[in-house]
Structures are given as C-alpha cells and as structure tokens.
Image: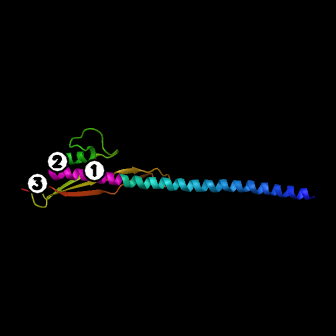
Amino acid sequence: MLKHGIGQRRMNSTRRSSRQKGSNLVEGALILLTFLLLLIGIVDFGQVLYFHQVLVERARTGARYGAVNPTNTAGIQNMVVYNTPTASGSAVVGGLTTAMVNVVNTGNNSNEARVVVTISGYNIQFLSPYIAQQFTNRPIVVATTAEGQVP
C-alpha cells in the first residue's frame, strides 16, 4: 500500500508538470508577441525620425543653394531632390519628387530678401500592421536670406 501511495504521487506530479509546461509555453508566446510588437514599434519610430532628419537636410541643401541662386526655382527643387541643380540621376531620398518641394522667393531686391523651401506630402511606410500603414510627414520649412538679390 505504501508503494501505491508513492506511485499516485508521481502520477499527480507528472500531471502537474505537463500542465506547467503548457502554461510556460503560453506565457512564452505572449511575452514573445509583446516583445516583437515593441521591437517593430521602435523600428517604426526610428524610421520616422530618420526620414524627418533626412528631409530637413534636403530642405537645408535647397535653401543653401537658394541663398546664392534665389531666382532659380527649378534648380532649388532639383538640389533638394537630386543634390544637383539639374534633374539628373536618381533621387537622394526614395519617393521624394520635385512636386513635393515648394520654393517661395520673398522680398526681391531688398534687404529682407528670403528664400523659403518647403517639403510636404512625403509618405513613410510603416512595418507595423497595427499602426496606419502610411504616414504623411509634416511639412518641413527652411528659410534663409537670399544674398544674391540685394542691390
């Protein structure tokens, strides 16, 4: 009878062990899912920061070119997109077009002459299925003094 009690305990212990293995598997799956969603969210956030910074640098490049050549609107747009005043080669940033670049030249031939470069409508694709699949970046505006216009 003593052996029967020990065998019964082992059987109960085995049942508990198999149930515990199943709950460990469920807990591990939930933790893995949470970790992967967090990781994808971090990558998406980093992607937004990266493209925002790249677009700001592109607008600054156009504004620097516009400070010297304020009346060359097409050249400024091409500097933003292609990094050259002529529309040659491929875009520096994929998906960026000259239609997304707006150039405003204010205060012609005065001490307040300025060139304002705006990039708007650039779409960023997300990896995460739970966030909107596409994000339109806020307009980026860079202004500089147009030195070439002052008489």
Give the secondary structure at mark 1. helix
The image shows residue 72 at horizontal and vertical percentages of: 16, 47
Identify the mark at residue 72; answer none if there is no mark: 2
Give the secondary structure at mark 2. loop
- Judged by its main secondary structure, the magenta piece is helix
Give the secondary structure at mark 3. helix
Q: Amino acid at mark 3?
A: Gln
Which is more N-terminal, label 2 or label 1?
A: 1
Q: Which residue is mark 1?
A: 58
The image shows residue 99 at horizontal and vertical percentages of: 28, 47
Q: Which residues are magenta?
A: 51-68
Occupied quadrant, residue 48: bottom left
User: Disc 2 and disc 3: Cα gap in Å?
Assistant: 12 Å
The residue located at (86%, 55%) in the rendering is: 7
Which is more N-terminal, label 1 or label 3?
A: 1
Pointer 1 local density, CA inside 10 Å: few below 14, some 14–19, many at least 20: many
Q: Residue furthest right?
A: 1
Which-is-in-front pick, marks 1 and 2? Answer: 1
Q: Residue furthest left?
A: 151
Which is more N-terminal, label 3 or label 2?
A: 2
The residue located at (26%, 55%) in the rendering is: 118
Pointer 2 local density, CA inside 10 Å: few below 14, some 14–19, many at least 20: some
Identify the mark at residue 149; answer none if there is no mark: 3
